[in-house]
Image (cartoon, grey):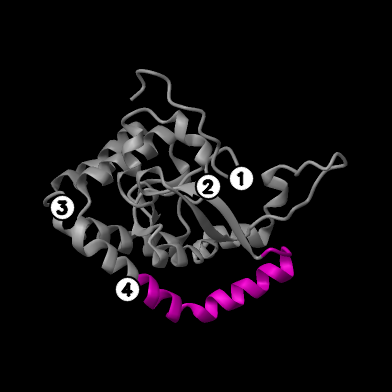
């Protein structure tokens, strides 16, 4: 796996520049325009998915969770819910693998559950492309290199998502995130956008090999990266 990841990272090193002007002056306007257009064009899809989620999974339709964004500033992430609230006899939630229904898996495999994040992008909390926003509780677990993933806005998709998504290790994922931060550019962003659309269409690398959802990050052992 490590050899494969390095092979995927290598082409990005050949991309021009670090995108200084693009990052400072053009990336945010592009995000705003693209997210606004996407919301308008996909409004019927948003409505239909919302109704189906309410019917099949109950309410609330929108899953909300605090996530760290640019410079680790906390914001509220919006997604369509994909799990039920089923609990055991003690009132504790059942495992993800039980609560994640066939319909929920469909939403994840098609990335339809991510569509409400377009409103996060419109508001400026996220970008079209960037490292995925993870749990707030992971913040103390990052090493200094991994923390650099917060030097840019988190994204709807990113370099790690098109190079394995949940099918690669946390360390490989963070290495790809940091590589993106170092090499962000207009060319790289559009490359990721086009590859993301292709991968969504073929539903590739949605889940990890050992769990219904990605295993929790427990920190990186010193000296690993």
Q: Which of marks 2 and 3 is nearer the N terminus?
A: 3
Q: What element carries label 4?
A: helix
Q: Is residue 21 visible?
A: yes
Disc 1, disc 4: CB below 8 Å?
Answer: no
Residue sticking out furthest to the top: 223
Binning the other alpha carbons within 10 Å of mark 2 as few (below 14), some (14 to 19) or many (20 upward) gives many
Residue designated by label 2: 207
Residue sticking out furthest to the right: 89
Say which residue appears at 60% left-offset and 40% top-offset.
211
Binning the other alpha carbons within 10 Å of mark 4 as few (below 14), some (14 to 19) or many (20 upward) gives few
Binning the other alpha carbons within 10 Å of mark 3 as few (below 14), some (14 to 19) or many (20 upward) gives few
Quote the CA–CA distance across marks 1 and 2: 7 Å
**Relative side of 225 to 94, left or right:** left
**Which disc, if any, is residue 212?**
1
Residue mark closest to the camera, 1 vs 4: 4
Residue mark closest to the camera, 2 vs 3: 3
Say which residue appears at 88% left-offset and 41% top-offset.
89
Height in image: 169 above or below 96? above
Q: What element carries label 3?
A: helix
Quote the CA–CA distance across marks 2 and 3: 34 Å
Quote the CA–CA distance across marks 1 and 4: 34 Å
Q: Give the range drawn in magenta.
A: 34-60
Say which residue appears at 49% left-offset and 48% top-offset.
67
Residue designated by label 4: 33
Disc 1, disc 2: CB below 8 Å?
Answer: yes
Residue designated by label 3: 20
**Quadrant housing the N terminus:** top left
Q: Earlier in the sequence, mark 2 or mark 4?
A: 4
Q: Which of marks 4 and 3 is nearer the N terminus?
A: 3
């Amino acid at each position: 796996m490590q050899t494969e990841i390095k092979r995927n990272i290598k082409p990005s090193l050949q991309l021009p520049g670090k995108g200084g002007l693009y990052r400072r002056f053009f990336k945010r306007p592009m995000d705003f325009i693209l997210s606004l257009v996407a919301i308008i064009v996909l409004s019927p899809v948003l409505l239909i998915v919302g109704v189906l989620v309410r019917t099949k999974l109950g309410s609330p339709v929108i899953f909300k969770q605090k996530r760290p964004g640019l410079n680790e500033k906390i914001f509220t992430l919006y997604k369509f819910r994909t799990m039920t609230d089923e609990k055991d006899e003690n009132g504790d939630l059942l495992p993800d693998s039980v609560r994640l229904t066939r319909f929920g898996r469909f939403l994840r495999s098609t990335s339809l559950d991510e569509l409400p994040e377009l409103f996060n992008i419109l508001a400026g909390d996220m970008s079209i492309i960037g490292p995925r926003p993870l749990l707030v509780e992971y913040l103390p677990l990052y090493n200094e290199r991994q923390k650099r993933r917060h030097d840019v806005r988190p994204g709807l998709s990113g370099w790690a998502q098109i190079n394995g998504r949940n099918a690669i290790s946390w360390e490989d994922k963070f290495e790809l995130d940091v590589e993106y931060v170092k090499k962000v550019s207009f060319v790289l962003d559009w490359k990721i956008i086009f590859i993301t659309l292709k991968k969504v269409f073929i539903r590739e690398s949605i889940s990890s090999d050992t769990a219904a959802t990605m295993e929790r990050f427990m920190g990186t052992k010193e000296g690993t990266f």
